[in-house]
Structures are given as structure tokens and as C-alpha cells.
Amino acid sequence: MSVAVLVSNRLFRMKRGVPFSIERFYSLGTTTSVQKAMSRLAKEGKVVRVAKGIYSRPKPLASIPSIKITAKAEDIAKTWARTHHYKLVPQGLEAAYRLGMQTQAPVKAVYWTTGPSREFKVGNEVVQVKHTTATKLRWENKPEGTLFRGLLSLSAEYTPVSTLKVAIKRLNLNEKEAIYVVNKLSHSPMLKMWQSKLNQLESSLLS
């Protein structure tokens, strides 16, 4: 069976509207042959190149089938990070908004990464990815990581303990887990200015 047929067969098992890396197909043949096959499928409109080395099967819009959706910019950014083994997390202001520590949503979707800064765009949807230090991406997919980044973006002086209680509630942690997270963050050198507020929060959780 030719590489072109193998690539085509695997492609049609991929979910529509979900980006994927061409690297997932390299086991089917040489890099050149797989790239040629994917390029041919792109010319035929069966797949769309949404970023360098990243493709997606177009998905017809349910209400208007003639309009096809390729992929969300956010999903493309996540696929890019996963492919290159970069860490990727919502930036501090986004984390603070999601946890209810600030009411105004960020104007743009911005992510922090250990990889290079770049931008992903699909139609009017834009996602900015900004390089930052690995220390800001600690506890990548854990509740303490989300709270940590939210705190980094806010002023300890102007943020009441009651706001931190809202954030803890949104993390959906039980009492033991919440105390563990707060205690861990209170010992972080990067959150030294938050130590008093975090100690107050921990005390309220213990009472």
C-alpha cells in the first residue's frame, strides 16, 4: 500500500475541526513522502494547513454547511506546544479572571510558554503565546499553578482575603486539598508579598 493511501486512510480517522501535527504520520513512510501526500490532500481541500506542521480536517458548520470550520486558534496553540514539548498555560490575568479574582476578562487570549513567542490566528480569532521563565509555569496543570499565576498578576495590597476565598472555591478543592495548596504557595519565594494574606486564608480554612 502506498504512503499516499496510508496517509489518506489515517487522515479520515481524524476528528474534524481538531488540529494535529504531521509528525503523527511520519511512521507511515519517509518524511518527504508523507509531506507530499499531505500537501496533495490540502490541495484537494480534504485537509487544511493551519500552522507550520499542523493540519486539520475542515468541519462543516451545523447551521450553514457551506461554511467550514478548520480549528480553534487555542487548540492550534496547544497542539503546537504538545508537538514541541513546550509548557503552555493561560497567562496570569486569565488565571485571575477564571478564578474570580478580577471581573474584567483579558482583551486578548494570551498564554505563557517555555517555547518561543508567537501568534496563532484563525479568522478573527487570535491567540498570543508569550515566552516566559519556567518558574512562572510551575505546577503547570495543577490547582496551585492556576492560583499561583493569578496571584502573580495582582497586587497583594489591594486584594482582600475574601477574594482569595472565592478563588479557592472555584478550584473545587476539599478542605484538606485547599489547605495544602495555600500552604505550599505561602512558602513560594515569588509570592513573598502574599505571605500575610495567604496565612490569613489558611487560618480561615483551618477554623
Image (cartoon, rainbow, N blue to C red):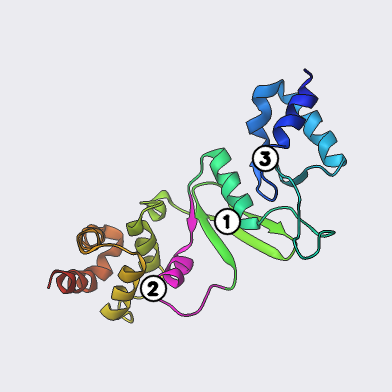
Residue 104 drawn in magenta: yes
In the image, residue 149 lies at what x, y percent? 39, 62
What residue does disc 1 label? Answer: 129
**Image point (71%, 25%), residue name:** 31
Q: Identity of the amino acid at label 2?
A: Leu
Which circle marks residue 14 in the picture? 3
State the image coordinates of residue 28 (x, y, percent, origin top left).
Answer: 69, 23
Residue depicted at 53% across the width and 58% down the height = 111
Residue wearing tag 2: 154
Residue 161 relative to residue 171: left or right: left
Which of the two labelled residues, at mark 3 and mark 2, occupies the earlier sequence position? 3
Quadrant location of the C terminus in the rendered image: bottom left
Q: Choose top left, top right, bottom left or bottom right for residue 68.
A: bottom right
Depth order, front residue of 88/24: 24
| Residue drawn at x 27%, y 70% as measured from the top left | 193
Q: Residue 72, position in %: x, y?
A: 66, 56
Q: Is residue 53 in the magenta section?
A: no
Whether residue 115 sits left or right of residue 71 in the image: it is left
Question: How far is disc 1 from disc 3 in space, using C-alphas?
Answer: 26 Å
